[in-house]
């Protein structure tokens, strides 16, 4: 049947009116918000994925239920902007493989119809997953991947609320400078880093900072991730005898490093770690007796609960699932979902572009989070520059104490660690 000009114009107007109404009707009628999660759920880093699952499920429970906590997203059940819609998490296992991560992200988007993805611990996996989400036009929240290069790729849908390794390393060197001013001997450092994007980016910034601050690099050792032996590398560290060892290692490598140091009789004067494996309970359960006095950079400290009592409640909820306290990684994972949920609430939509715009406009006061940050506010590159790092010292029995910066510290540093 042919349509006359008036009928054709009227049908066009009707279609134009129905298109946005259709999207609005979908958003308002949504009973759940589906979010993808990509972590290592098997292999040598499986515990990272298990803990991430517990952290994100804790955050989802706080959002979906109604908690009387002074925490962003806690009060009221569900996503208010979508009529109380509940969050549903869909988990995928990237197995520490960047290409597996890419494939899993694509499956979550095309089959599970997720509106955003959170991940991924390994920076190398975050690189491929975020490139995939960019192609499909949905937001990616890098909860805990800390490579500085991730937010410098001109991606529109990439966001990271936590600090990156340049910010963390600067805090480490600021701390060492402060210790020198107190009369401590710190002339040299040894860099020890795995060979993926996490380790190499960490080493690059530490080399630069050492040169700028006048520290001699006694050793700069790059090793193969998941190496079966680190004997030759530890022998080089022992020969270098630096005042501070700066390791950037994931869990299994961190355990092997400490065991090898013990076998070869190498006791570093001090260790300041780039977190990762050195923030994991598995490492301290296995070799913690040899790590008393170790310092690790961090994003989170339970000590902050003295100022924000709701942190204790959040930790209790997490611990009921995980059997352990929140740490550097799980605190960032937990926070990432709350930030994403806040954006979806303000967007009143599960449309990727609208969520992206809401994330770009985020401005969450630090005191409304469990983190020791000034606030959450993303720059044009998707990085939050107000994510203030802390330094934590391991005091034994799976406990850490905040030692830096002074505004957050609850104790002085034990220096040297083996004194």
Image (spheres, rainbow, N blue to C red):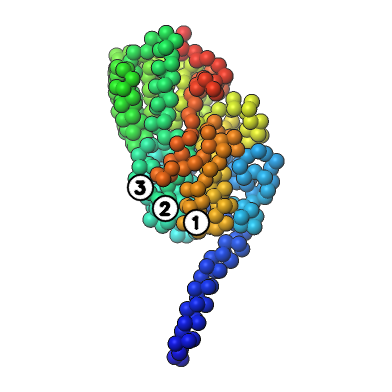
- The picture places residue 323, in percent across and down from the top left corner, at 61, 33
Q: Mark 1 or mark 2: which comes first in sequence?
A: 2
| Above or below for 415 versus 321 | above
* Drawn side of residue 332 relative to residue 229, left or right: right
**Nearer the observer, 378 or 168:** 378
Q: Position of residue 167 (x, y in %)?
A: 41, 31
Residue at position x 50%, y 59% from top? 351
382 or 282, nearer to the observer: 382
- Residue 68, quarter of the rendered image: top right
Query: Considering only vertical position in the picture, is 404 above or below 349?
Result: above
Q: CA distance from mark 2 to mark 3?
A: 13 Å
Q: For mark 2, does the 10 Å Cα neighbourhood hold few (<14), some (14 to 19), or many (20 or more) residues?
A: many
292 displayed left or right of 320 = left
Look at mark 3 in the image and give the residue it sits on: 154
Q: Earlier in the sequence, mark 2 or mark 3?
A: 2
Q: CA distance from mark 1 to mark 3?
A: 19 Å
Question: x, y percentage for residue 321?
Answer: 62, 38
* Residue carrying label 1: 354
State the mark number for residue 133.
2
Tell me where residue 72 sits by quadrant: top right
* Marks 1 and 2 in Cβ contact (< 8 Å): no
Q: Residues within 10 Å of mark 3 (few under 14, many from 20)?
A: few
- Residue 253 in the image: x percent, y percent? 39, 29
Task: Identify the residue at horizontal 52%, vertical 33% (top origin).
Answer: 373
């Amino acid at each position: 049947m042919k349509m006359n000009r008036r009928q054709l114009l009227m049908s066009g107007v009707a279609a134009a009116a129905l298109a946005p109404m259709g999207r609005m009707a979908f958003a308002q009628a949504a009973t759940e918000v589906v979010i993808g999660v990509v972590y290592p759920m098997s292999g040598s880093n499986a515990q990272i994925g298990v803990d991430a699952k517990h952290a994100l499920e804790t955050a989802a429970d706080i959002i979906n239920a109604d908690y009387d906590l002074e925490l962003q997203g806690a009060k009221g059940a569900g996503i208010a902007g979508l009529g109380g819609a509940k969050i549903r998490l869909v988990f995928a296992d990237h197995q520490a493989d960047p290409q597996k991560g890419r494939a899993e992200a694509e499956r979550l988007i095309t089959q599970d119809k997720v509106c955003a993805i959170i991940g991924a611990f390994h920076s190398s996996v975050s690189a491929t997953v975020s490139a995939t989400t960019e192609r499909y036009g949905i937001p990616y929240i890098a909860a805990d991947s800390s490579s500085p290069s991730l937010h410098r790729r001109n991606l529109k849908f990439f966001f990271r609320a936590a600090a990156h390794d340049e910010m963390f390393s600067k805090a480490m060197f600021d701390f060492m400078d402060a210790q020198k001013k107190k009369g401590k001997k710190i002339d040299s450092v040894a860099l020890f880093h795995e060979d993926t994007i996490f380790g190499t980016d960490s080493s690059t910034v530490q080399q630069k900072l050492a040169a700028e601050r006048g520290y001699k690099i006694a050793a700069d050792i790059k090793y193969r991730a998941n190496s079966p032996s680190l004997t030759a590398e530890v022998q080089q560290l022992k020969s270098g005898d630096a005042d501070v060892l700066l390791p950037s290692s994931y869990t299994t490598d961190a355990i092997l490093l400490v065991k090898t140091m013990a076998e070869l009789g190498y006791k570093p004067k001090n260790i300041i770690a780039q977190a990762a494996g050195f923030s994991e309970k598995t490492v301290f359960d296995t070799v913690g007796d040899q790590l008393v006095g170790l310092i690790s950079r961090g994003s989170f400290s339970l000590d902050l609960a003295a100022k924000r009592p709701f942190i204790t409640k959040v930790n209790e909820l997490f611990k009921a699932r995980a059997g352990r306290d929140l740490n550097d990684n799980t605190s960032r994972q937990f926070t990432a979902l709350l930030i994403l949920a806040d954006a979806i609430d303000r967007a009143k939509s599960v449309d990727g572009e609208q969520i992206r715009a809401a994330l770009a406009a985020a401005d969450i006061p630090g005191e409304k989070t469990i983190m020791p940050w000034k606030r959450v506010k993303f720059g044009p590159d998707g990085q939050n520059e107000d994510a203030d790092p802390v330094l934590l010292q391991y005091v034994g029995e799976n406990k850490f104490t905040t030692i830096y910066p002074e505004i957050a510290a609850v104790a002085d540093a034990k220096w040297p660690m083996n004194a």
